[in-house]
Amino acid sequence: MFKDKSKNAMPSSSSNETIIAQGVRVEGDFQSQGDVVIDGEVVGSVVTQSSLHVGESAKIHADVKAANAVIAGEIIGNVVVGEMLELLSTSHVQGDITTERISVAAGARINGQIRMESKQKGSSVQAKDEDTK
């Protein structure tokens, strides 16, 4: 209804990305359907249905849920990633991790349990374990 068609209007972004820049602090529950890039500080919870990138300067004191994630900074809280989690050498996670696939670079620090779960219930590994009982 109120669309600005002037030449000075900002072009709409084709990607749905949210950036929390270094020096910015967000408190509360943060939810997004698009990609999220965090270089600042978040206290509360972070949920995205897409990809999450946590920069080296980021400090997150929250539970985190994402479809995919690349972590270079610090997370104090549980991390749930539906597909692929990549922990870079500068990352530090204090909390439990649940993911389908994980890549951990030398130097990454993890203080918590790691659980790898397939999206498919009753995966072949579980079935084999039950057959041996």
Image: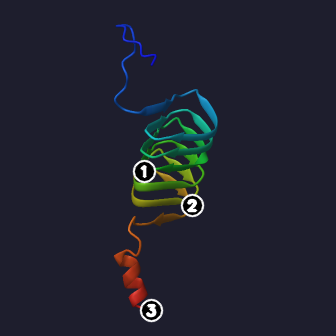
Pinpoint residue 10: horizontal percent, then vertical percent.
Answer: 40, 15
Outermost residue toward the front in this view: 1
Report the Cα–Cα distance between label 1 and label 2: 20 Å
Please give the residue where the numbered disc 1 appears in the rendered image: 67
- Quadrant of the rendered image containing residue 104: bottom left
Mark 1 or 2: in front is 1
The residue lying at 45 percent from left, 43 percent from top is 52
Which sits earlier in the primary sequence, circle 3 or circle 2?
2
Three-letter amino acid code of the residue under disc 2: Gly
Which sits earlier in the primary sequence, circle 1 or circle 3?
1
Which sits earlier in the primary sequence, circle 1 or circle 2?
1
* Mark 3 Cα-neighbour bin, 10 Å: few <14, some 14–19, many ≥20: few
Q: Quadrant of the N terminus?
A: top left
The numbered disc on residue 118 is none
Mark 1 or 3: in front is 1
Pinpoint residue 126: horizontal percent, then vertical percent.
Answer: 41, 79
Cβ–Cβ under 8 Å for marks 1 and 2: no
Report the Cα–Cα distance between label 3 and label 2: 29 Å
The residue lying at 48 percent from left, 65 percent from top is 115
Q: Is residue 46 left or right of residue 123?
A: right
Please give the residue where the numbered disc 2 appears in the rendered image: 112
Please give the residue where the numbered disc 3 appears in the rendered image: 133
- Quadrant of the rendered image containing residue 113: bottom right
Disc 1 secondary structure class? loop
Viewer-proximal residue among 111 and 48: 48
